[in-house]
Image (spheres, rainbow, N blue to C red):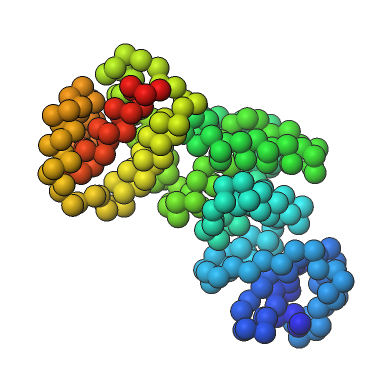
C-alpha cells in the first residue's frame, strides 16, 4: 500500500486495490514520508473508507486542522451510534460531527457558552440519539479531560439524526419543532399528558418523524384511501377532530395540505396513544 497524499504527520490517503481512496490514521504514520512511499502498516490505527467523493475531500480538508484525538473520539462515537441504533449513517457525519466536536471544545476552552434551544424536545423525540450524545460527553471527558455541558449532548444527537435521515441540519431542526408542535396539539386537545414510556407513544413518534420528513421533502402519502379515511372519520371522531386541528395548523404554518391518507394514519395513531396508553 502506497501513500497517495500526506495530510499531516498522522493522516494520509491511499488508493486501495479497487482504486478507491482510503483515509488512514496513525501516530507518526506520515513523518518524513512523501506520496509514493510505502505505508508503514504497523502504525495504522484507523482506516476510513468514504464512498462520497465530496465528503471525502471535505473530510481530508478538516483533518489538516483538527487534532488526531478529536477524530478518534468522533469515530468512536459514530461506531457506537451505528451499533446502538442498528442503522447506516450518512458519511457526512464524519465531517459534521468532527467539526462540531472541534468547535465545542474550542468554545469550552474559551469560556463561551451556547445553549441548545431544542434540548427539551431532543430528549423526548430523539431519546436514543440523546443517550448517545451523553455517552459522547463521557468519552470526551475520559479521553481529553474536558467536561462539556449537557446542551452539547443535544447538538451531537442532532448530528446523528441528520445522518440517519440524510437531511440537511436546518430541515432536522424544523422537523423537530414540527413534531413537538403536533404533540402539543394532541395534549392540549385531549387535556392529558402522554405516556412517553408506552409502546403506542413510541409508534406515534416514529410515525411523526417520517411524516415530518415527507413534509419537508415534499413527498406526502397520496393514495387517497377514501375507505380508510371515511372509516376513521366515523369511528374515531375525537381523534379525527384533533387531526383537523393539526391539518389547519400545518396548512397555516407550512402551506401544506394533508392528504386523506395522512389524516387517516394520524387519526389511528392518535386514537391508540390517547386511549391505549
Q: Is residue 271 left or right of residue 134?
A: left
Quadrant of residue 112 within the rendered picture? top right
Expressed as whole percent of the image width and height from the top left, the position of residue 77 reads 67, 48
**Res. 210 visible in picture:** yes
The residue lying at 31 percent from left, 49 percent from top is 214
| Left or right of 149 in this view: 258 | left
Task: Tell me what residue is drawn at x 57 percent, y 47 percent.
Answer: 85
In the rendered structure, the answer to whether residue 256 lies left or right of residue 82 reads left
| Image spot of residue 116 (x, y percent) | 53, 31
Name the one closer to the observer, 266 or 46: 266
Q: Residue 252, can we see it? A: no
As displayed, is residue 181 above or below residue 9? above
Q: Quadrant of the N terminus?
A: bottom right
Instruction: For the C terminus, give its image quadrant.
Output: top left
Q: Residue at x 53, y 34 (%)?
A: 127
Residue placed at 73% from the left, 37% from the top? 138
Amino acid at each position: 500500500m502506497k501513500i497517495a497524499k500526506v495530510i499531516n504527520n498522522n493522516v494520509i490517503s491511499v488508493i486501495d486495490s479497487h482504486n478507491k481512496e482510503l483515509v488512514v490514521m496513525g501516530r507518526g504514520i506520515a513523518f518524513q514520508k512523501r506520496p509514493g512511499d510505502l505505508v508503514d502498516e504497523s502504525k495504522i490505527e484507523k482506516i476510513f473508507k468514504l464512498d462520497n467523493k465530496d465528503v471525502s475531500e471535505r473530510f481530508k480538508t478538516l483533518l489538516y486542522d483538527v487534532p488526531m484525538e478529536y477524530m478518534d473520539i468522533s469515530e468512536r462515537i459514530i461506531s457506537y451510534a451505528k451499533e446502538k441504533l442498528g442503522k447506516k449513517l450518512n458519511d457526512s457525519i464524519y465531517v459534521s460531527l468532527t467539526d462540531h466536536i472541534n468547535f465545542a471544545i474550542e468554545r469550552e476552552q474559551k469560556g463561551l457558552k451556547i445553549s441548545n434551544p431544542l434540548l427539551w424536545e431532543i430528549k423526548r423525540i430523539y431519546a436514543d440519539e440523546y443517550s448517545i450524545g451523553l455517552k459522547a460527553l463521557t468519552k470526551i471527558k475520559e479521553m481529553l479531560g474536558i467536561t462539556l455541558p449537557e446542551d452539547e449532548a443535544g447538538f451531537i444527537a442532532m448530528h446523528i439524526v441528520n445522518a440517519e435521515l440524510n437531511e440537511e441540519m436546518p430541515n432536522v431542526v424544523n422537523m423537530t419543532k414540527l413534531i413537538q408542535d403536533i404533540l402539543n396539539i394532541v395534549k392540549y386537545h385531549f387535556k392529558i399528558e402522554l405516556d412517553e414510556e408506552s409502546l403506542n407513544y413510541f409508534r406515534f413518534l416514529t410515525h411523526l418523524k417520517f411524516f415530518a420528513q415527507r413534509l419537508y421533502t415534499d413527498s406526502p402519502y397520496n393514495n387517497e384511501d377514501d375507505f380508510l379515511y371515511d372509516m376513521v372519520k366515523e369511528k374515531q371522531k375525537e381523534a379525527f377532530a384533533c387531526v383537523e386541528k393539526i391539518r389547519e395548523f400545518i396548512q397555516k404554518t407550512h402551506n401544506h395540505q394533508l392528504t386523506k391518507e395522512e389524516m387517516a394514519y394520524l387519526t389511528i395513531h392518535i386514537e391508540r396513544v390517547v386511549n391505549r396508553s
